[in-house]
């Protein structure tokens, strides 16, 4: 036997910590600088990049393939 504890002590005997916390919203000063010229072109280039564009088509294709091939029909399958 490793331990013999009464169930009442195990569940209600240990004093619970009563902690209080406060949260203060952080405040950051807005940076002030003139926007660079031609930022629209650079922004569109950045948003059009494969690293930052939407991956919805990949996720949908993956979900479709996984759901479609996770169960095989055994009727007519010869194991080839």
Image (spheres, rainbow, N blue to C red):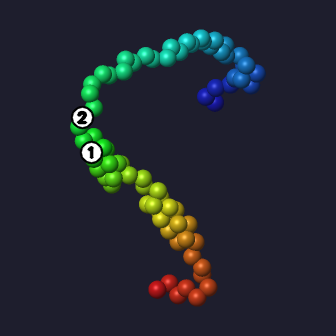
- The quadrant of the rendering that contains the N terminus is top right
Which residue is at the front of the view, 64 or 44? Answer: 44
User: Which residue is at 70% across, 23% downward?
Assistant: 10
User: Which residue is at 53% across, 87% downward?
Assistant: 78
User: Which residue is at 37% across, 17% downward?
Assistant: 29
The image quadrant of residue 50 is bottom left
Q: Is 80 positioned to the left or the right of 18 in the image? A: left
Determine whether 70 is above or below 10 in the image.
below
**Badge number at residue 42:** 1
The image quadrant of residue 5 is top right
Counting from the top left corner in percent of width and height, residue 66 is at: 51, 66
Give the CA distance from mark 1 to mark 2.
10 Å
Q: Which residue is tagged 2?
A: 36
Q: Are marks 1 and 2 in contact (CB under 8 Å)?
A: yes
Determine whether 1 is above or below 23 in the image.
below
Counting from the top left corner in percent of width and height, residue 68 is at: 55, 71
Residue 59 seen in render: yes
- Element at label 2: loop
Within 10 angstroms of label 1, few (less than 14), some, or many (20 or more) residues?
few
Counting from the top left corner in percent of width and height, residue 35 is at: 27, 32
Residue 51 seen in render: no
- Element at label 1: helix
Q: Is 21 positioned to the left or the right of 27 in the image? A: right
Q: Is 78 positioned to the left or the right of 45 in the image? A: right
Seen from this angle, which residue lies furthest left? Answer: 37
Within 10 angstroms of label 2, few (less than 14), some, or many (20 or more) residues?
few
Counting from the top left corner in percent of width and height, residue 24 is at: 50, 14
User: Which residue is at 64% across, 26% downward?
Assistant: 3
Which residue is at the front of the view, 43 or 56? Answer: 43
């Amino acid at each position: 036997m490793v331990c013999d504890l009464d169930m009442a002590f195990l569940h209600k005997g240990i004093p619970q910590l009563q902690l209080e916390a406060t949260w203060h919203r952080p405040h950051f000063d807005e940076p002030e600088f003139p926007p660079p010229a031609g930022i629209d072109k650079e922004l569109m280039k950045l948003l059009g990049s494969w690293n930052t564009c939407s991956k919805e088509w990949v996720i949908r294709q993956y979900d479709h393939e996984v759901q479609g091939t996770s169960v095989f029909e055994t009727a007519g399958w010869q194991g080839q």
